[in-house]
Amino acid sequence: MSIEFKKVGEFKRGILFELLADTYSFSNDIVQDFGTRWKENDNFFFDNLHIADECCFITTLNDKAIGFICWDPRNMLDYVEIGDNCIITDYKGNGYGKLQLKEAINRISSKGCKSIIVTTSDILIPAQRMYESVGFTLDQSREKKNSWDINYILSVSNLNLN
């Protein structure tokens, strides 16, 4: 098993959208609700590779892209908000998502960030468990963007990267 975290610029435009579409292929509603935003984000990162390569990476297994994670650094040092975070269907449940998340947390915390925020859905129980396993805690006080959002916050001092 050879897991690597590679720069977005090493891939072709459209890869981020493809990975997300596969990850959420179990729900037509999610793909319909977010597909346009995924395409816009893919274009943004490929139009701004200097940002993509600093705030996003693609996870590969034996050189096959199996997922990616990105974050918004605009409020760095106070907090960073994780954006898209996915592992494609055939590779879910094998710990790759947790490895990917830990790598992102290490990169973010190395920049001196105090906390990390992530929003997930109440239907994505495995994602919730993964976030909680590394120290994220549920924060009911954050305003929800959608009715199905669940907000988690991780204080960098509460990291559990074992």
Image: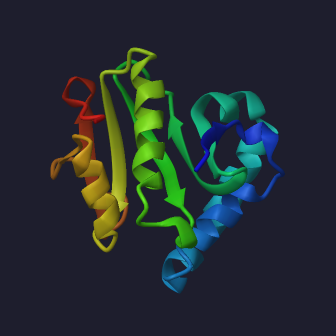
Q: Is 102 on the left-hand or right-hand side of 23?
A: left
Looking at the image, residue 23 sits to the left or right of residue 148; the answer is right
Image quarter of residue 57? top right
Q: Residue at coordinates 61% horizontally, 72% vertically from top-left? A: 22
Q: How many labels does the image show?
A: 0
* Image position of 79 with respect to 4: above or below: above
What is the x, y in percent for residue 63? Answer: 72, 50
The quarter of the picture where residue 20 lies is bottom right
Query: In this view of the protein, which residue sits in the foreground, 95 or 16?
Result: 95
Percent x, y for residue 140?
Answer: 15, 52
The residue at 58%/50% (across/down) is 1
Task: Please say which color scheme the image uses.
Answer: rainbow
The extreme top residue here reads: 112
- Using the image as rendered, state which of residue 68 and residue 140 is in the foreground: 68
Judge whether 63 appears above or below 106 on screen: below
Q: Where is residue 125 in the image (x, y as percent from the top left)?
A: 28, 68
- Estimate the x, y position of residue 46 in percent, counting from the top left: 78, 43
User: Looking at this rendering, what residue extends furthest in the front direction?
Assistant: 1
**Residue at the (70%, 65%) spot, across then down:** 18
Horizontal relation, residue 126 to residue 92: left or right: left
Tell me if I can see residue 83 in this picture: yes
Residue 121 in view of the camera: no
Q: In which quarter of the image is the C terminus?
A: top left
Residue at screen point 58% across, 78% down: 32
Task: Please determine whether, in this image, residue 117 is positioned above or below residue 75.
Answer: below
